[in-house]
Amino acid sequence: MGHYLDNAATTPMRPEAVAAMLPLLTEGFGNPSGAHRLARAARQVLDDAREVVAEALACLPGEVVFTAGGTEADNLAVRGVVEARGGRPLCSAIEHHAVLEPVEHLGGVVAPVGADGRIDLERLEGLLDPDITLVSVMAANNETGVVQPLADVVEVVRRRAPRAAVHTDAVQAACWLDPGAYAAGVDLLSISAHKFGGPKGVGALVVRAGVEVAPLLRGGGQERDRRSGTQNVAGIAAMAEALRLAALERADEGARLAALRDRLVDGLVAALDGVVETGVVDGDRGHKLPSIAHLCIEGVESEALIFLLEKEEVLVSAASSCASGAMEPSHVLVAMGYDRALAFGSLRLSLGRTTTEADVDAALAAIPPAVERLRRGPRR
Ligand code: PLP
């Protein structure tokens, strides 16, 4: 596997989640909507998984809608609420594209963030009006790891846009933050199994009782008419097991990874000039997920750096994407006010359950010489 430091992109599946999944792919393959014993057994698996997910997300089982991942859960929240209520959506400028694109598609409003990567509450207040029916602010950002002040967002929305439901994309946060604390008062919440040791293509949207969402998918009426289509029973059972274990281990793992993350970032900042850690104010990492180290490195382009690091078996990511042949800086860094040149040097090192001291050592050994080599430019 090499030194895998890209857990915010996806995580290896937990063995316990694989074990939960396998029998449901073989003998336990029933369709949970049917009537015979195989179908009833599959329905029982689904009911049990729904209870586990509800407990982990501090909601009722009937409020859990299983989806085919985080993107679908986000789309269902934004499009489903706006179709049901009319009006317009609003989201923060640093949302994942799974929120940003549907909001923009519906003619919605995009609210700015400050240089620290947190939503600007005053400007949010100014943008809210009674025509806004859905406000989406992510629990924690997938590039910077910055945690958003959700309780304050809920308070402002209730006051200024009383028709609006509040959605949070908790895809990155679910593993690391306690939803009972950070998402209290939120109406809708998205998760995705592959970010916490479950399989890809499985997720859930919590839809609080009384909040109506128009379905994206119509058909057999599964998930109480909110999401038609035969459920991915094996994937859902695996997600439930992964989420249950992540919640159990959250405090210990969070502390372990925060210490590793600190050693990693502090080591890189000490070894290199021109390194900026994003989302940190006066050295305070209190608003960052323990799992994400995010840096902007002057004088390098992250694509080239990633390539050099891969040769040393250190697997990391950048946030800029190559769209239609032209490099675009990350919309998150642009929203935070970073200039393009610095934004092109962004590097995300994301830690997870399988990350060890040796992975951090390898990154600390590989990154400074790679950066220096790139800064010197091509050999003549
Ligand atoms: N939202 C956030 C914050 C994410 O990081 C991701 C995945 O990168 C998604 C949504 C999309 O989730 P999925 O890959 O399950 O569609």
Image: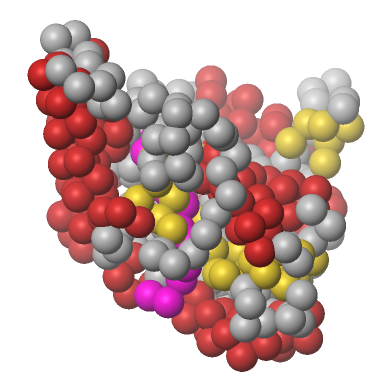
* Above or below for 103 versus 15: below
* Above or below for 121 versus 167: below
Position of 4 compared to 14: left or right?
Answer: right
Tally of marks? 0
Residue at 58 percent of width and 49 percent of height = 214
The coloring applied to the image is secondary structure
Rendered location of residue 24, percent (x, y):
19, 18
Residue at 15 percent of width and 34 percent of height = 44
Judge whether residue 139 can be spotted in this image. Answer: no
Position of 296 compared to 252: left or right?
Answer: right
Residue at 19 percent of width and 9 percent of height = 26
Residue stretch rendered in magenta on the structure: 184-194
| 127 or 287: nearer the viewer | 127
Position of 178 compared to 134: left or right?
Answer: left
| 120 or 261: nearer the viewer | 120
Rendered location of residue 181, percent (x, y):
32, 74
Rendered location of residue 1, percent (x, y):
36, 21
Q: Quadrant of residue 236?
A: top left
Toward the top, the furthest residue is 26
Rendered location of residue 324, percent (x, y):
87, 27
Residue at 45 percent of width and 29 percent of height = 220
* Above or below for 206 versus 37: below
| 125 or 342: nearer the viewer | 125
* Above or below for 37 versus 181: above
